[in-house]
Every structure is written in C-alpha cells, then in structure tokens.
Image (cartoon, rainbow, N blue to C red):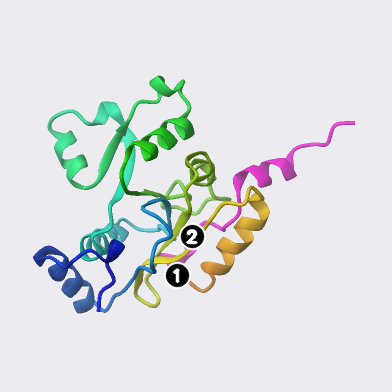
Amino acid sequence: MTPRWQNRPATLGSGLAAAALGLFGWTVLLPPAPGKKLVGVAYPHTSNWDLLPALLWTWATRTPLKFVAKHSLFKFPLGPLLRAWGGVPVNRRRAGDNFVTAVAALIAQQPEIVLGLAPEGTRERNEAWKSGFYHMAQAAGVPIALIVFDWKRKRVGVLAYLTPSGDLAADYEQIRAVYSGVQGRHPQKATPIRPAEIEVAAESPQEG
C-alpha cells in the first residue's frame, strides 16, 4: 500500500502515479512525518531524470512538496507552470537579500509544506554540500526530511527525518549514515556529503 502524507485519502491521480512508479519498479518511501512543515533535501541529484520519480512520488503520496525560485520568474507564461509544479516565489530584497530569512518566513506562512532543496547545488560532482537547507530548517524551527533518488534499488521518497541540533558536523554524520549505500543515476557525479563551511574553515590559513 502506498503511504500518503498525513494519511490523506487516495485520489484517482495519486493512484495513477503510484501505479506508474510500481510499473517502473520503484518503491515509494514516506515514514510518518514529525510535523506538517519540513525542509527536504534531495540526494543524490545527478540527472534531469530525477524529476520523473520525484513528481510521481509527490503525486502518489500527496505530499505538499514545494521549491523556491526568484519572484521575477513567476511572470506569464512561465509563472503558471512553475506554480503548478510546486514553485513558490521568494523576493530576496524584501528580506534584506537574506535567502535563509526569506525562506523561513515563507515556511511560517504555509499551513503545511515540504520545501525541497538540492544541497549539491548542481547535477555535476562538487566538493561539498551547500548547507543553506540546514540553516533554513533551524531558522524556521522545523525538521529536515532526507529524500532519496536511489536508482540502484529503485527507491524514491523520504528515508528519515532529522531535527537540527546546532552541531553541524555531528548532524552531517547522521545524514551520511542515512544515505549510506544509495546510488544516483550517475554515481560518479554525486557530491560527497560534507558541509562546505567546514571544508572552507579547514582550508583557511591559521592566524598567528
């Protein structure tokens, strides 16, 4: 049986999406959420094809998955399409050009939301994750949903939830453990799970 967000009833659309995932051999993952507001990280995001299982998972589970984009993009004709896919406009200038603050305010305004982010920042291999998702979750006071595109075992959805402790290094250790063994469509493009802040700090010359 396909799990659904907050035990929502099935619809024709959710049933068709679940059937499509099953037809392609995908397993749908969605453990009971600790709340109605989450910041979601999607990993490993190595291919444009990740969009297909992501959308089908969203429809099958009826999860209120959203993503943020510049408010200037939400003009006709692109705006309606972005909104239909879950896009939410954010005006950085009104938040003092602080994206974390803007997103935290957006989450506070929503009755329920899973705000999806790709911490790798690119579909090509990078040196470390961008930790904006972590600071957004802290600022909004919400847990983090660890979402996976596991092409090796054909799994899509939430593996686990994490409440930020404030200890970035320790929390990244937990994230690495959760994602252990997962494989993207292009494994060689997956970015190592480590925070860019710590990488930069380690490379900076010591004063003295």
Please tell me the numbered disc located at residue 9.
Answer: none
Instruction: Specify the quadrant that holds the C terminus.
Output: top right
Q: Nearer the viewer, residue 51 or 95?
A: 95
Position of residue 142 relative to residue 22, above or below, is above
Marks 2 and 1, the one that precedes in the sequence? 1
Q: Is residue 15 left or right of residue 190?
A: left
Name the image quarter holding residue 70: top left
Query: In terms of image quadrants, where is residue 207?
Result: top right
Task: Answer whether labels 2 and 1 touch (C-beta < 8 Å).
Answer: yes
- Across and down, in percent, residue 155 comes to 36, 73
Q: Is residue 196 magenta?
A: yes
Checking the image for residue 190, the label placed there is 2
Identify the amino acid type marked 1.
Answer: Gln
Residue at the image point whose x is 57% and y is 58% from the top: 193
Three-letter code, disc 2 = Ala
Point out the image quarter for the N terminus: bottom left
- Is 144 inside the magenta-drawn segment? no
Q: Is residue 200 left or right of residue 87?
A: right
Q: Position of residue 173 (x, y in %)?
A: 63, 61
92 or 110, which is in the foreground?
110
Q: Is residue 18 above or below residue 191?
A: below
Q: Secondary structure at mark 1?
A: loop
Within 10 Å of the Cα at label 2, are there few (<14), some (14-19), or many (20+) other Cα atoms?
A: many
Q: How many marks?
A: 2
In this picture, which residue range is highlighted in magenta? 184-208
**Residue drawn at (27%, 26%) of the image:** 72
Q: Which residue is disc 1 drawn over?
A: 183
Residue at 53 percent of width and 68 percent of height: 178
Q: How far from the left and from the top, in percent, is residue 185?
A: 38, 66
Tell me the element at label 2.
loop
